[in-house]
């Protein structure tokens, strides 16, 4: 009985060590993966959210100005036709 208990104790100890080693490998793999992903994203030259929103706002303002100018041109053309 004593031999079986020692065997199971030793087996449990080995299983615990194996689980700890597997967890260490998992953490190391995650670290490497995150590092590679960060490097890949940095190389892709993505714009920041702030830069994107600034350009979007500029485009919106330009579109609104373009629509206002188109309306002014249409009104001027209408007045020109009325005077001729």
Image: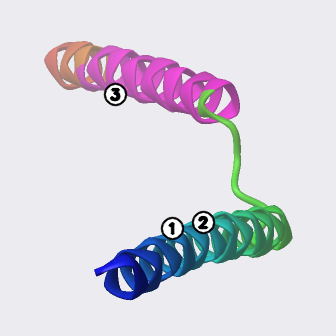
Verify CB contact (< 8 Å) between mark 3 and mark 2. Answer: no
Of residue 65 and residue 39, the one placed in the foreground of this image is: 39
**Where is residue 15 drawn, in percent x and y?**
47, 77
Q: Mark 1 or mark 3: which is in front?
A: 1
Label 1 SS: helix
The quadrant of the image that shows the N terminus is bottom left
Q: Earlier in the sequence, mark 1 or mark 3?
A: 1
Q: Nearer the viewer, residue 80 or 28?
A: 28
Residue 83 location (% of width, % of height)? 23, 14
Can you give x and y, in whole percent of width and height, for residue 4 in the image? 33, 85
How many other residues sit within 10 Å of disc 2, few (<14), some (14-19) or many (≥20)? few
Describe the colour scheme in one phrase: rainbow
| Residue 20's disc number | 2
- Check whether the beta carbons of the residues at disc 2 and disc 1 lie within 8 A of each other: yes
Residue depth check, mark 2 versus mark 1: number of the one nearer the observer = 1
Left/right placement of residue 25 relative to residue 66 reads right
| Residue at (62, 32) in percent of width and height | 55
Q: Secondary structure at mark 2?
A: helix
Disc 3: which residue: 70
Residue 42 sits in quarter: bottom right
- Residue position for label 1: 16
């Amino acid at each position: 009985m004593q031999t079986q208990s020692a065997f199971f104790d030793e087996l449990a100890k080995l299983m615990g060590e194996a689980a700890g080693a597997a967890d260490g490998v998992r953490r190391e793999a995650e670290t490497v993966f995150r590092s590679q992903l960060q490097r890949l994203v940095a190389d892709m030259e993505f714009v920041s959210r702030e830069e994107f929103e600034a350009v979007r706002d500029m485009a919106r303002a330009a579109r609104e100005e373009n629509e206002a100018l188109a309306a002014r041109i249409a009104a001027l053309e209408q007045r020109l036709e009325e005077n001729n």
